[in-house]
Image (spheres, helix red, strand yellow):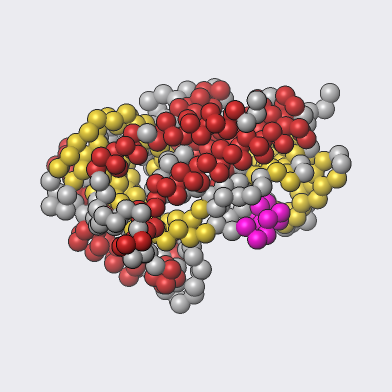
Amino acid sequence: MTKRRALVIGGSVGGLFAANLLRSVAWDAVVFERNADELSGRGAGISTHPQLHDVMRRLGIAFDDSMGISVDTVVFIDHDGQIYDQRDTVRVMSSWGRVYRSLRDKLPSENYRRGMSLTRVEQDADGVTAIFADGSRERGDLLIGADGGRSTVRELFLSDAHPVYAGYVAWRAMLDENQIPPAIHAEIFERYTYCLPPGELFLAYPVPGRNNETEPGKRAYNIVWYRPTHPDKLADFCTDASGKSHGTTIAPPLIRPDVIAWAKAQARALVAPQVAWIFEHDPRPFFQPIFDMDTPQIVFGRVALLGDAAFTVRPHPGAGTTKAAVDAAYLADAVSEHGVDAGLQRYQRVQGAFGSGLVAQGRRDGSYITDQHKPREQRRNPDLTWGVDDLMRDHETRSEAVLRLFNASRRMAE
């Protein structure tokens, strides 16, 4: 009996989850990645949730100490570097690179093709065909768009649906553990750290090192700094040194030196000196504009969107990688148990609800920063600084919120 075949567009973690999970239910699955070079991540620390752990274990990847770093303390540090609040927590912080490598290593090399840029999709009653920029054509029973927030697959079917800028950016930095002065390391490295400049949110935490190491001495410290940024300022940030505008996003190597110097000066002025030192000593911190999009449809005949290609969720729930894993697991089970057509309809109903719920959660979590552009009387929270208790409540209940959305979506299949 010939195996059913899936064409997976996008070779990041979402595509790798999809390919590996479909292979686990006796499908053939081939990944097509547009980049010719091996993917790599920079400064991409991630939170993890129990649902992610479960999917990894299902694939035979033990979510053990080598997958992440356990953090048991949260500290709040003021502008002068004094810890003014401390709480217990239970978090496992990992990195995009660590998850990517574990998934990539499971997929045979012949099932992962680089330098394949999708241009068109054709469907008929018997299957789906992907047409690539080099003129090649690939035939399958199912095509999965797992090609990120700027998805080509989504654009082919929902040309009017685009992620919307949320009004703020996340500055990111990462420094190797062995580059951090001993006094700063002893005070914050093993902790999840918050700084709360007015109207902003600065957080930092340990992650696996640049080569995915979790051994002490080889790890890294990751910074994410959410800052309200007017669209005009974002446009300036996204203009390179030659004067070329890149719209609302820019590749990190193209960020102008004066923009980076400005960001480092802002860190010195606004956040605790311990974390400002780390931010300053990353040679090239970069920024990520924050977008979101609640997609009206994620299945189109024999084509399904997955992960960030399906829904663009703000980072606050810390569930981007978890969502990709859960999407892929449900999709694999649905088409295996119910066939392609009926399985995809179940996927639309269940994972559509899950994705939409996560978008709404991200908007609630990020509303404080978005509202900084509004007159104070129009803000949902008129305060100029975060309430520590409210912030900790969000911090501690992230996994519970993801679980609630997960369970609610599953009930839709009953």
Q: Residue at x 35, y 58 (%)?
A: 379
The answer to which of 145 and 178 lies nearer the viewer is: 145
Res 395 → quadrant:
top left
- Measured as percent of width and height from the top left, residue 272 is found at 18, 51
Position of 49 with respect to 162 (left or right) is left
Q: Is residue 221 magenta?
A: no
Relative vertical location of residue 304 with respect to residue 291 in this rendering, above or below? above
Relative vertical location of residue 152 with respect to residue 88 in this rendering, above or below? below
Q: Overall secondary structure of the magenta stretch?
A: helix
- Measured as percent of width and height from the top left, residue 130 is found at 76, 49
Q: Quadrant of the C terminus?
A: top right
Name the outermost residue toward the right.
Answer: 125
- Measured as percent of width and height from the top left, residue 129 is found at 79, 47
Position of 57 with respect to 120 (left or right) is left
Q: Quadrant of the N terminus?
A: top right
Instruction: Kindly tell me whether residue 9 is visible in this rendering.
Output: no
Name the outermost residue toward the bottom.
Answer: 243
Q: Residue at x 66, y 33 (%)?
A: 331
Position of 139 with respect to 277 (left or right) is right
Q: Residue at x 25, y 46 (%)?
A: 387
Position of 8 with respect to 128 (left or right) is left
Instruction: Kindly tell me whether residue 409 is visible in this rendering.
Output: yes
Q: Residue at x 33, y 66 (%)?
A: 375
Res 260 → quadrant:
bottom left
- Measured as percent of width and height from the top left, residue 403 is found at 47, 30
Range shown magenta: 152-161
Res 243 → quadrant:
bottom left
Total numbered badges shown on the rendered structure: 0
